[in-house]
Image (cartoon, grey):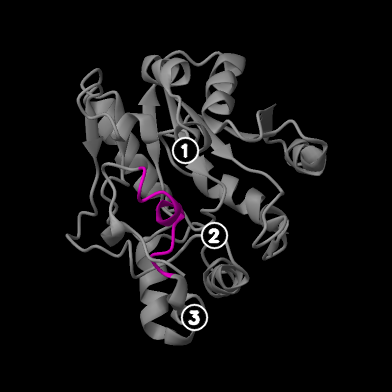
């Protein structure tokens, strides 16, 4: 298994968010730590762009002993495919974005467990179609063969930029599975654990400062308990809950509608 964390320094809303401090280490380093805690994640690497602006990010990874691959800035589908070739992965590739520093390792293992325990049954397994976990626990795993098919055939800009829409937009061509939260709850539009805006950083920083010192392996239950005890932390970015990239492509997506996103 090869788990790829896509990252870059450029961001119009929150520049260089991956380098922001979380209890003494850059945000990206903290996320890599959490992903590596997942027992099924296998080889974990960061994939960034080949632009000069991401030289410091590549240096950061090397400084912390994190494997890094550099590729296309705009064609994320190509970046994932080329990274798989670079690392010699011919079985399965996991995609996790770098805006998920609170991702729960147990959720990663659950999604990857569905893929591994039904070996050969699915081409693509995720917990996003539809999503039920709090936003920021994004896990998508695909066979290398499926990734290669998408890399070869996907044409639309959103399919290249977001890597995986070619799979879940073509359920007649790929064998798909979706993992839902075992609680039966759906917090995907009400709880935001991802980072894209300054308010998100305030939220994530507050969660880390409250939980990390006593328990570096804190998980979903710990976070939800904290938010019940500290509604002031939940409120830091509550108005952004439900805002995601789908909102800019509703006219292009067949399997996503306005109920799956919120406009600013």
Q: Residue at x 71, y 49 (%)?
A: 10
Where does label 3 land, which residue? 233
The residue nearer to you, when weighing 190 against 62, is 190
Residue 60 appears in which quarter of the rendering?
A: top right
Where does label 2 land, which residue? 216
Where does label 1 land, which residue? 158
Q: Is 246 located above or below residue 199 in the figure?
A: above
Contact between labelled residues 1 and 3, with CB atoms less than 8 Å apart? no
- Furthest residue toward left: 184
Q: Position of residue 55 (x, y in %)?
A: 81, 38
**Segment colored magenta:** 241-252
Question: Of the residues under marks 2 and 3, which one precedes in the sequence?
Answer: 2
Q: Nearer the viewer, mark 1 or mark 2?
A: 1
Q: Name the side, left or right, on which 226 lies relative to 215.
A: left
Helix, strand, or loop for circle 1?
Answer: helix
The alpha-carbon separation of the residues under discs 2 and 3 comes to 19 Å
Q: Position of residue 156 (x, y in %)?
A: 45, 31
245 drawn magenta:
yes
The residue nearer to you, when weighing 105 against 168, is 168
Helix, strand, or loop for circle 3?
Answer: helix
Q: Residue at x 28, y 53 (%)?
A: 257
Question: Of the residues under marks 3 and 1, which one precedes in the sequence?
Answer: 1
């Amino acid at each position: 298994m090869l788990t790829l964390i896509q990252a870059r320094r450029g961001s119009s809303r929150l520049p260089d968010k991956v380098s922001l401090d979380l209890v003494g280490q850059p945000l990206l380093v903290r996320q890599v730590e959490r992903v590596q805690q997942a027992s099924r994640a296998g080889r974990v690497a960061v994939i960034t762009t080949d632009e000069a602006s991401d030289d410091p990010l590549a240096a950061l990874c090397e400084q912390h002993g994190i494997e890094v691959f550099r590729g296309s800035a705009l064609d994320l589908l190509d970046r994932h495919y080329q990274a798989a070739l670079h690392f010699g992965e011919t079985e399965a590739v996991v995609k996790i974005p770098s805006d998920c520093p609170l991702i729960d390792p147990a959720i990663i293992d659950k999604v990857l467990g569905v893929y591994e325990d039904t070996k050969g049954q699915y081409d693509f397994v995720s917990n996003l179609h539809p999503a039920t976990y709090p936003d920021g626990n994004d896990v998508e795993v695909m066979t290398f063969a499926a990734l290669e098919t998408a890399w070869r055939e996907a044409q639309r800009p959103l399919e290249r930029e977001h890597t995986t829409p070619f799979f879940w937009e073509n359920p007649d061509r790929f064998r798909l599975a979706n993992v839902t939260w075992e609680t039966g709850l759906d917090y995907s539009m009400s709880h935001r654990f991802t980072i894209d805006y300054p308010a998100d950083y305030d939220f994530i920083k507050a969660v880390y400062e409250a939980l990390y010192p006593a328990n570096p392996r804190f998980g979903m239950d710990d976070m939800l308990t904290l938010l019940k005890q500290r509604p002031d932390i939940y409120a830091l970015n509550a108005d952004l809950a439900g805002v995601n990239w789908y909102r800019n492509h509703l006219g292009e997506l067949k399997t996503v509608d306005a109920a799956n996103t919120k406009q600013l």
